[in-house]
Amino acid sequence: MLSNTEKELIVQIWDKMLPVAEDIGSEALLRMFTTFPKTKTYFSHLDISPRSEHLCCHGKKIVQALAEGARNISTLTTTLAPLSRFHAYQLRIHPTNFKIFNHCILVTLACHMGENFTPVAHAAIDKFLSAFSAVLAEKFR
Amino acid sequence: MEFIGQLPPLFLRTIGQTHLAEIHGRRPRRPYLNICPVLKPQDTMVKWTAEERAAIEAVFASLDYESVGRESLTRLLVVYPWTRRYFGGFGNLFNTEAIMANPKVAAHGTVVLQGLEMALEDMDNIKKTYASLSELHSEKLQVDPGNFQLLGDCLTVVIATRMRTEFTPVIQAAWQKFLCVVVAALRRQYN
């Protein structure tokens, strides 16, 4: 459950990340592919080498979707319905990978924000990412 | 086709496994030749490249154990509140401010990092290094081993906030491999 303070904090953080969406998104993806190579199996159709156009473009899309979700936390299920269908029926990602990617997003935010990524911000973003992934995975079965 | 029905079940399973192994691109096993494989110790040991060892040592060298230890344990208790169940004797852990100011949390954070450092002494024998700690956590402290991963994640996030761009994806990969091995060693004595 997110308190009102946490919801505001989440919106603030993602609004700050939007101007650098390509950097944040591509870095999170790159961290995931480097630390957890099995996740690359879902991207055989893209060039996911560091700083590639595909990686930056895909990373930007992800951060934009996260920012959109942050602005509509109370209606996540409705907001993410198309993405939820896409992940369930077309991508069919193994559910454990959501946690892996969430962790890499947290590490990326920590690297960028430094000490501004406080324990309270960490908790809020972690809860948000869990809720976001749960909605993306809810149509899986 | 009737001949197939006369083949022993183990042989039929082997044919099936061979076919499936080929589909998945793996070399098929031959169970008749390898019924009870004797693995040499070096077959099951974790292998570290020189770059991985250097990366892990570099991360440790950059750490202020007191500060990073305190913050990692604080984050564990704040981000994953159920972990507070293991620290009943630490006093006030009721809210974020209390946790951040708690001296026992700070002290124990340092103990955790000193414990992690033990692995550096013999990176090829991490299982042996943590045998007694594993027993302590399973038998006496009764900690759900799922929480080891969470503390590792919190520590990784704290390191990222300190090292910033120096915590590259390659260094992160080596560090997370190290944590994975330590967590596996700590889980070993759980029956």
Image (cartoon, coloured by chain):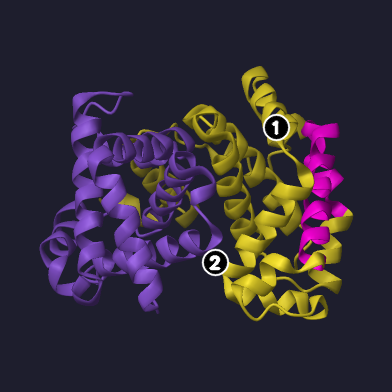
Q: Quadrant of the C terminus of chain A?
A: bottom left
Check disc 2 and give the amino acid type: Val
Can you tell which quarter of the image residue B144 is in? Answer: bottom right
Q: Is residue B144 visible?
A: no
| Residue type of the residue flagged with mark 1 | Ser
User: Can you tell which mark lies on residue A33?
Assistant: none
Q: Which residue is mark 1?
A: B62
Q: B53 above or below B60?
A: above
The question of residue B121 being in magenta is answered with yes
The disc numbered 2 marks a residue on which chain? B
- Is A37 placed left or right of B172 in the picture? left
Tell me if residue A10 is in the magenta stretch: no
> Quick check: A32 left or right of B129?
left
Image chain in purple: A
Q: Would you say B125 lies left or right of B156 here?
A: right
Q: CA distance from mark 2 to mark 1?
A: 24 Å
Q: Residue B57, how many percent across, how many down?
A: 72, 28
Q: Which chain is yellow?
A: B
Tell me which label, 2 or 1, sits earlier in the chain: 1
Query: In the picture provided, is A114 more to the left or to the right than A38?
Result: right
**Residue tagged 2:** B79
- In the displayed structure, would residue B116 be above or below residue A131? above
State the extent of the magenta-drawn residues as a range: B104-131
Residue that protrudes farthest toward the left in the picture: A82
Q: Secondary structure at mark 2?
A: helix
Q: Quadrant of the N terminus of chain A?
A: bottom left
